[in-house]
Image (tube, grey):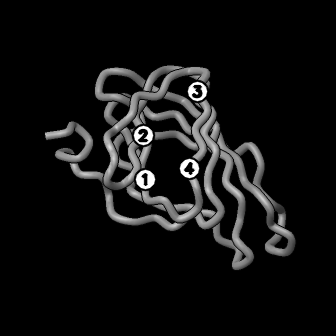
Amino acid sequence: MFSGAATIEPLYMPKDTAGKEVSAATVTFEPCARSAWHTHPKGQLLIVTSGTGWIQQEGETKQLIKAGDTIWTPSGVKHWHGATDKTSMTHIAVQPYSSEGKNVDWQEKVTDEQYFGK
């Protein structure tokens, strides 16, 4: 799910499987920490609350994100996000659930070559 040091603090989690609509968590990434590649069946909203980080959609250039930025990733778009190599980054992640009760599909880890752009 993550490479490096990342802390997840749930903000909102549905109490049961019936009627799941959305979950939300604050995620703090230490320098060089990042998520694995993943998709969301109904998309994901990120609200960067502190620090600077990177986000990348498959086939696209890595983008710098910073406190105050909001990022919407559409459903089914493969992507990753995390801290830069020199700074930490915290964001609130909000993701709706699909009708099957899923909100994320984790995939392979981001390699150092992908992360550092080598």
Pointer 2 local density, CA inside 10 Å: few below 14, some 14–19, many at least 20:
many
Q: Are marks 3 and 2 in contact (CB under 8 Å)?
A: no
Q: Which mark is residue 73?
A: 4
Q: Quadrant of residue 99?
A: bottom right
Residue 61 lies left or right of residue 20; in this view the side is left
Vertical relation: 59 (above or below) 40: above
Residue to which mark 2 is pinned: 55
Front in this rendered view, residue 28 or 114: 114
The earlier-in-sequence mark between 1 and 4 is 4
Q: Left or right? Give the position of 21 relative to 115.
A: right
Q: Position of residue 56 (x, y in %)?
A: 39, 44
Q: Report helix, strand or loop for mark 1.
A: strand
Above or below 30: residue 73: below
Circle 1 Cα neighbour tier, 10 Å, few/some/many (<14 / 14–19 / ≥20)? many
Q: Earlier in the sequence, mark 1 or mark 2?
A: 2
Report if the CB atoms under discs 1 and 2 are less than 8 Å apart. yes
Say if mark 1 contacts mark 4, CB within 8 Å: yes
Amino acid type of disc 2?
Ile
Crowding around mark 4 (Cα neighbors within 10 Å: few <14, some 14 to 19, many 20+) is some
Q: CA distance from mark 3 to mark 2?
A: 12 Å
- Contact, CB < 8 Å: mark 2 with mark 4? yes
Classify mark 3: helix, strand or loop: loop
Q: According to the image, label 1 marks what residue?
A: 79
State the image coordinates of residue 28 (x, y, percent, origin top left).
52, 34
Please, is residue 94 above or below residue 90 in the view? below
Element marked by disc 2: strand
Give how far apart the Cα atoms at labels 2 and 4 are. Answer: 10 Å
Q: Secondary structure at mark 4?
A: strand
The residue sitting at the front extreme is 60
- Residue appearing at x 60%, y 67% in the figure: 41
Q: Which label number is shown at residue 69?
A: 3
